[in-house]
Amino acid sequence: MALDGARGARDEESREKKKKKKRRRKEEEEEEGEEEEEGAEAGGSPSAATMGDGDAGGRGLAGARPRGTERPSAVHGRLVLAFAVCIVALLAVTALAVLLSLRFDGCGPGAPGGAPGLPARGGNASLPGPHPRGPGRAAAVGRGAEREREPEREPEREHPWTHLRLPGHLKPLHYNLMLTAFMDNFTFSGEVNVEVACTNRTRYVVLHASRVAVDRVQLAEDRAAGAVPVAGFFLYPQTQVLVVVLNRSLDAHRNYNLKVVYSALIENELLGFFRSSYVLHGERRFLGVTQFSPTHARKAFPCFDEPIYKATFKISIKHQATYLSLSNMPVETSVFEEDGWVTDHFSQTPLMSTYYLAWAICNFTYRETTTKSGVAVRLYARPDAIRRGSGDYALHITKRLIEFYEDYFKVPYSLPKLDLLAVPKHPYAAMENWGLSIFVEQRILLDPSVSSISYLLDVTMVIVHEICHQWFGDLVTPVWWEDVWLKEGFAHYFEFVGTDYLYPGWNMEKQRFLTDVLHEVMLLDGLASSHPVSQEVLQATDIDRVFDWIAYKKGAALIRMLANFMGHSVFQRGLQDYLTIHKYGNAARNDLWNTLSEALKRNGKFVNIQEVMDQWTLQMGYPVITILGNLTAENRIVITQQHFIYDISAKTKALQLQNNSYLWQIPLTIVVGNRSHVSSEAIIWVSNKSEHHRITLDKGNWLLGNINQTGYFRVNYDLRNWRLLIDQLIRNHQVLSVSNRAGLIDDAFSLARAGYLPQHIPLEIIRYLSEEKDFLPWHAASRALYPLDKLLDRMEKYNVFNEYILKQVATTYIKLGWPKNNFNGSLVQASYQHEELRREVIMLACSFGNKHCHQQASTLISDWISSNRNRIPLNVRDIVYCTGVSLLDEDVWEFIWMKFHSTTAVSEKKILLEALTCSDDRNLLNRLLNLSLNSEVVLDQDAIDVIIHVARNPHGRDLAWKFFRDKWKILNTRYGEALFMNSKLISGVTEFLNTEGELKELKNFMKTYDGVAAASFLRAVETVEANVRWKALYQDELFQWLGKALRH
Ligand SMILES: [Zn+2]
């Protein structure tokens, strides 16, 4: 599963920077005595505000609304109502059932829950005859049975349906699932037949089911085909299970067939079996798709919905013949009926977990290709996108990637086909369902004529990620959700390895990984409120929570560290063994560690990988290594390690951190160098709090640790060594590798932020950048400057900082200039580094207010408006749009707004929408915020980005923060279940709040909504506290140094 926004920070940076530009420009204008804009703004406000209120959803949207939806909505409304009544009745029945210790026999019309109009729900319509006497007798039977078992009964087993995990007495072997989908009223009915093996004697069948209305339950012994009398059944919503109570116990070591007949809604939310729509030739078309990960298969059919219960599945879907249906496996046969319906019978799947099942019902068309090994790959999307060829890029690289992974893992792809489905709406960027992976359109469709390199990179990496999951995830599945990083960390790491295969010159794993993964996650994992990468899952809500950046990015960073200290080829052989041993099964982290240790052993190396890695996966956070040259004892250095925390005061507050003395076994690579020469790399395993080591260190020689930043930790030095390193960078930076330069920049900024280093050290380091010709160090600097900039951007002395940064950027900006023409696809590979560097520098120049940059952006936008031809180079379009919106008047905003509506290319739509958040005009920002909640205008997943981007704009930060608080109930309802989106929103809106007042507002707000999204809010509070603390302690020091530096 790819979370959304993986690589979005960069674009956000550009927007924010643009905002600064605006501000700077405004100040310049004020200096020049321009007053027109002021006047225009004052005049413009009321009308904009009026439009904002009245226009929400108005513009062009009424027209886009499908005429045909009236009736289905009404039907749907009634269904929802009926459904709600069922659920309420079921809840009542359930509660009563529990209270009465399961006096459920004979729950017919006369039973306690036999609500009028609901004869079959909650009771059993096919209840066998022998027990017609009703609740009285049933109660006696129930109590009697329980009394008999009492002596040996453990209290927690009394109600086996009340636990997070299923009881484990039954194991599903095979499912036959028959669905009928009614796309005209968005309901479906289903019949599931599960063959189960009984491992322990039990009187209850407990399996997952949620939001389904169960009509009938039957159980039969496998061989004898004789019915096992069902006493009753009920849904238990607290643990989302269906409990079938039997009149006699099932015997161990026998197989049974469970049949459940049910119906449910094709939901209008993004989980389970849900619906979505798009407009084609002015007509709205609907589709039904699924998202079962992590625990939503139970919303589509009753099942044993835990990853460990792998089974085979045979799915049949009946639907109107105007639609087509897709599932994990190819269609085996299709049976057409006279009334315009068709039933597609899909081939049986291999053993797999429920959350990887998928199906879709749509009117899409496709293009296809075949891999060398004969796997049929198809890309399905809305017909207009297929016609335009927007899916061709994804299709092409998917074929190559399957071939790459088959070769790398030495395990063939397991299914006969892989379909990629591009849907308009999805809770995540993508989901790796086996054989039917589903992507949100923006992460898979690519129109080469309007896509930038960064968009191409985004699309590429999401696809590389999902294809990797076909092995890490689908084929070998983590045992339980605590180790979700085992699949997500690998898929994220392989995004870089796989992209290197597609674009060998890009050095993704060696370079881009640092800025996009390592630096980003260390920022998050440096909080006292972080958590270990392996997370305990104790309750249902924890399951959604484990899908976060720590699992993805820290998981990937730890895997990269491991691959580096093992050696890449041994690591690869270890992975091949791991996949071969565990294919079609489940594995836990120790299975991986053991296989990798074995692989090392075969190579003559003996490292207990489990012992090393447990410290990294079971402890939160990471260490900072400090290397101190000992001047009194020659050639001796002291190496210490401690837990790195941004806000040291948070450490003293968190009891858990005080009580733990965190230690890691750290593979510290180290070199010694001077102006012209660098020693070869040595590795020191640091495992104590403080260690002495002997190293030949001549006068004037510097030390550098964590070579190429392959390790997941930071390195600090004594000031003398920092000075020598800065001197080296300024005199000849190429003595240090590109990754080392980027690593030094990020370490220095982070160490200063946390107070380990004087504030000016990182600012001194970036002075060498005027000579830097590589992209990565610029990128690292740009990203490190970003949070610092946010801390300062609403302060009086901000301009001093601004000026300093502009000074560092100016030379390179002039040297590189602007891209002249749009390059075509064939040039992408050759020019990636150069174009990305140019883009980064333009972004910095424009956001910090370089006059030439502003002028260029304004000219390009004006040219577009006057000629109605967009000649803006693709790779800098987002920068130009945002700068234009921030500098120019409301007409430009309206123009971009109009283009946002009219464009069909998803990449272009995204950057146009984001550009709208760059305005300085608070009325426009407010209007945009209000419009963002209208699903007809802004897709649900994009609304979050709108709010977050407004929060990044210094002119909009308080507006977004207020909007977030005002609309929290709506937002939480909308994104609550997809917790990742919720936490992304919470951190995005709060991370740059930095005043005492804002901190107080945040704490008060949390009190009002006690317990909701608690972990995200705790993180938010710690971040804001750290911001406030940094300002109190260090801002003066920073500004003083900057003032002096600028005078020299
Ligand atoms: Zn994933």
Image (cartoon, rainbow, N blue to C red):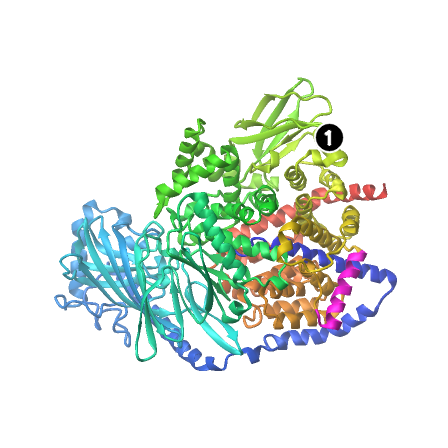
Residue drawn at x 81%, y 59% is 27
Q: Residues within 10 Å of mark 1 (few under 14, many from 20)?
A: some
Res 999 seen here? no
- Residue 333 lies, with reference to residue 374, above or below; the image says below
Res 197 seen here? yes
Left or right: 505, with 119 as reference point? right
Report whether the residue tagged 1 is closer than 8 Å to ligand 1: no
Q: Residue furthest front?
A: 372
Instruction: Confirm whether the magenta stretch covers residue 448.
Output: no
Residue drawn at x 42%, y 79% is 72
- Residue 122 lies, with reference to residue 824, above or below; the image says below
Q: In this orientation, which residue lies closer to the viewer: 232 or 655?
A: 232
**Residue 130 sits in quarter:** bottom left
Residue drawn at x 70%, y 62% is 882
Q: Position of residue 664 (x, y in %)?
A: 51, 32
Secondary structure beneath disc 1? Answer: helix
Q: In this orientation, which residue lies closer to the viewer: 508 or 668?
A: 508
Q: Which residues are magenta?
A: 851-869
Q: Position of residue 237 (x, y in %)?
A: 35, 61
Instruction: Confirm whether the magenta stretch covers residue 866.
Output: yes
**Residue 822 sits in quarter:** bottom right
Report the amino acid beneath label 1: Leu
Q: What residue is disc 1 on?
A: 724
Q: Position of residue 278 (x, y in %)?
A: 51, 72
Q: Position of residue 511 (x, y in %)?
A: 61, 43
Numbered circles on residues, count: 1
Q: Quadrant of the C terminus?
A: top right
Magenta: main secondary structure: helix
